[in-house]
């Protein structure tokens, strides 16, 4: 085993880093000593200064770049800007994602494309910007944030479930390409987490879903982030191509 980097020398880019789960991932990586840049969506511009202030008061200075990561050129530009700030990326967490839920018979092509672009194309664009360099430097940690619904499906989410299942296919294939270069690629599949995304589900529908969760409640974003931080640690080099479920028992598989 070659010598491992110290967290204090490491850098991370977190897509969707200004979202609920992404914020906790930024916070925990920064707390572990990494320098972190978050990528967010341009529609969030107004709230970013306050977001950065809140993190800074908690002792975490996180840079921010805004772009529509479903767009190849915009994503490449944001990744370049993040790399300019950091010098390199040891860690990439692909956590950018949206929902456009509808029964399949009602789902429009726009809803399909929006979710596939933001949730899956973004993974291609952002990983493209760092993977070759990680391999050349002999170290990298890529974590893709998928979903329990990419594993078990969900009524009303053909677009989202397809994108999230696709992320794990991407993970398994890229893990094989990165393995001999010290680059691990893993998926974390959260269940229902307390975020604005789940808050948008009709209360009576959400209630029915929570009733099926063996742990009896939704997850907190920090409970997802701690698994991501674990996978990003220098010592986690023997875990690759894995899909770690953090779903309160909602879906169990061997
Ligand atoms: N199983 C079977 N039937 C269902 C159903 C289910 N799980 N959910 C809804 N239906 C049925 C309703 O009973 C209703 O049937 P009738 O017409 O016979 O009464 C019909 O679907 C209603 O469908 P509509 O097209 O009229 O649409 P709606 O406005 O009721 O909404 C929906 C449908 C968007 C799918 C809504 O039910 C919903 O939001 N479901 C939850 C989807 C979900 O879990 N999204 C997760 C978002 S969070 C996330 O994605 C994060 C993560 O990773 C977990």
Image: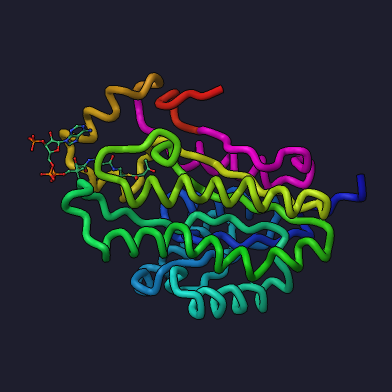
Where is residue 47? Give x, y as percent. 36, 68
Compared across the picture, whether 136 is left or right of 49 comes to right
How far across and how far down the image is residue 11, in percent?
70, 62
Quadrant assignment for the N terminus: top right
Question: Residue at the spot x=51%, y=24% of the render?
Answer: 253
Quarter holding ligand 1: top left
Instruction: Identify the image quadrant of residue 249.
Output: top left
Left or right of residue 63, residue 216 in this image: left
Residue at screen point 36% across, 59% down: 115
Question: How many numbered markers are drawn?
Answer: 0
Q: Is residue 132 left or right of residue 244?
A: right
- Image quarter of the C terminus: top right
Viewer-closest of 80 and 128: 128
Stretch of the chain drawn in magenta? 217-245
Q: Residue furthest top?
A: 214
Nearer-the-camera pick, 28 or 91: 91
Question: Does residue 227 show up magenta in the picture?
Answer: yes
Is-magenta flag for residue 98? no
Task: Pick whichever, 120 or 137, lies toward us.
Answer: 120
Q: Using the rendered view, name the quadrant where residue 36 is placed.
A: bottom right
Rendered residue at 40%/48% (across/down):
162
Relative to 109, residue 235 above or below: above
Residue 238 at what x, y percent from top left?
Answer: 77, 38
Q: How is the image coloured?
A: rainbow
């Amino acid at each position: 085993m070659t010598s491992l980097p110290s967290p204090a020398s490491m850098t991370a880019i977190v897509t969707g880093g200004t979202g609920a789960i992404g914020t906790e991932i930024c916070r925990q990586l920064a707390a572990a000593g990494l320098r972190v840049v978050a990528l967010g969506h341009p529609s969030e511009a107004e709230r970013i200064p306050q977001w950065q202030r809140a993190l800074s008061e908690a002792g975490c200075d996180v840079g921010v770049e805004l772009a529509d990561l479903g767009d190849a050129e915009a994503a490449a530009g944001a990744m370049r800007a993040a790399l300019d700030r950091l010098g390199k990326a040891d860690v990439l967490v692909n956590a950018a994602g949206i929902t456009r839920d509808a029964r399949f018979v009602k789902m429009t092509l726009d809803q399909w494309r929006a979710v596939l672009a933001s949730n899956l194309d973004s993974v291609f664009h952002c990983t493209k910007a760092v993977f070759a360099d990680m391999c050349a430097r002999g170290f990298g940690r890529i974590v893709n944030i998928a979903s329990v619904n990419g594993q078990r499906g969900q009524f009303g989410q053909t677009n989202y479930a397809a994108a999230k299942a696709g992320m794990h296919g991407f993970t398994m294939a890229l893990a094989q390409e990165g393995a001999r270069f010290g680059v691990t690629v893993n998926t974390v599949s959260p269940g229902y987490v307390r975020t604005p995304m789940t808050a948008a589900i009709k209360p009576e529908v959400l209630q029915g879903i929570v009733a099926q969760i063996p742990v009896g409640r939704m997850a907190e974003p920090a409970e997802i982030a701690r698994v991501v931080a674990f996978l990003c640690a220098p010592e986690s080099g023997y875990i690759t191509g894995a899909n770690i479920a953090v779903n309160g028992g909602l879906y169990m598989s061997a």
